[in-house]
Image (spheres, grey):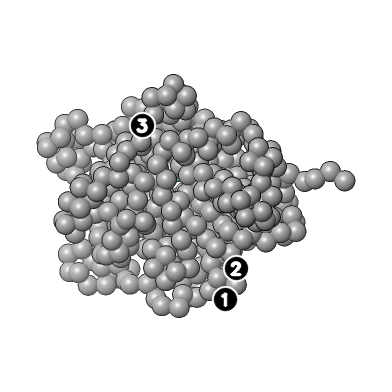
Amino acid sequence: MHEHSKFLLADSQIPSAWVNVLPSLPEPLDPPLNPHTRMPLTPEDLLPIFPMELIEQEFSPQREIDIPGEIMDIYRLWRATPLYRARQLEKALDTPAHIYYKYEGTSPAGSHKPNTAVAQAYYNKRAGIRRLATETGAGQWGSALALACQLFGLECTVYMVRISYDQKPYRRMMMHTWGAEVFPSPSDHTNSGRAVLAVSPDSPGSLGIAISEAVEDAATHADTNYSLGSVLNHVMLHQTVIGQEAKLQMQQAGEEPEVVIGCFGGGSNFGGMSLPYVLDRLAGKGPRILAVEPAACPSLTKGTFAYDYGDTAKLTPLIKMFTLGHDFVPPGIHAGGLRYHGASPLLSHLLRLGYIEAKAYSQIPVFDAALQFARTEGIIPAPESAHAIRAAMDEAIAAREEGRAKVILFCLSGHGHFDLGSYETYLSGKMQDYEYPGREVADALAAI
Ligand SMILES: Cc1ncc(COP(=O)(O)O)c(C=O)c1O
């Protein structure tokens, strides 16, 4: 009998509900605070930028939330995504470990991001909103939201971090193809952007600055809402389709993972993959769960657990999370989607309670892993996703040294077809590693 390398699900097996861990937490989350009053946020505080149905999901006490039929119709365009066993990589590493990966790069935008973009566009359309404004780092989130808005007949404005706007023209062209308008951030379209440009006209931008611009745009236009591609509870919720499918596919493979791994920017692919397994952990069983972040922007491993703003201009609510400080502008690493100062409050809470672990890598060892993966499994990974590959390979190498067959599952959150400039930099030997920017982080933390 041949050995299976991929595990597929029928359309009828796509999850019909998102799973919510909020009601199962042993201690509740600290509430987000209104930035003006410093009192716990009320749903009304969020109405200028979010539709009520998403606000309800943000604080929902329900264990499961049914996925509306209109969203299922769109999910079926690419879901369920495949689960692979990385047999070629296992051979190359000469490891007894079994390595599985859930590949989210088969969506039209090339990553996991449409799982929530589609849901957010749907609920905003139902609320009578005409346009969504958002930020994007490397362009994965912006292109996912551009696609989702197009599918639901909404307009879309994307503030794209300047360094990526210049380095990744093809992502910008995808957004244009799906009908969005795209501004390099900091831009002169908002007060927040103009304030940054006045001080540093050549600013490379950051996600924190771009979020300020998008939130300001939404808050100052009645027909426009804001949409965030990570961090918030409702985003984690929508992404749980990943882990639910992976569990079914691991059952098909007849194995239980010993460790579940995902790269970590704000937490959405990691949360999507791991939260269904966190429910097992909360019930006293389940795998180790490992988040992998860049050493140049290590919010989970070097950040402080504190109330901080989600953006640079302090327009967002204060949220309790692991943070490097809202002023921190991370070095220009190639994994643009991981350049965020904060982290999901839900995943921060789970890290603090010991249900998940975190680890940081610098970018050269990450690209070493990306190359080995591309040359064995074939898929060229997004630089963000390659952080998870690095950690999975190190787990597999440790298993070889221990001489035991460990089962490893990771989320391959996207492909790197528009990140080939980064591969060229690596292949030509020009890639550099950044020291941990301890000084800048200390300054930024002093400001919170
Ligand atoms: C392919 C890919 N993976 C991971 C991330 C990180 O985001 P998150 O932590 O929300 O999954 C991004 C962000 O843009 C991304 O594009």
Graded by Cα atoms within 10 Å as few (under 14), some (14 to 19) or many (20 or more), the crowding at tag 3 reads: few
Graded by Cα atoms within 10 Å as few (under 14), some (14 to 19) or many (20 or more), the crowding at tag 2 reads: some
Q: Residue at x 14, y 41 (%)?
A: 195
Element assignment for label 3:
loop
Between 293 and 71, the one nearer to me in the picture: 293
Graded by Cα atoms within 10 Å as few (under 14), some (14 to 19) or many (20 or more), the crowding at tag 1 reads: few
Q: Amino acid at mark 3?
A: Gln
Between 304 and 199, the one nearer to me in the picture: 304
Using the rendered image of the protein, determine whether residue 45 is visible from the camera's viewpoint: no
Q: Which residue is mark 3?
A: 432
Q: Are marks 2 and 1 in contact (CB under 8 Å)?
A: yes
Element assignment for label 2:
loop
Q: Which residue is mark 2?
A: 286
Q: Amino acid at mark 1?
A: Ala
Q: Is residue 426 above or below residue 145?
A: above
Element assignment for label 1:
loop
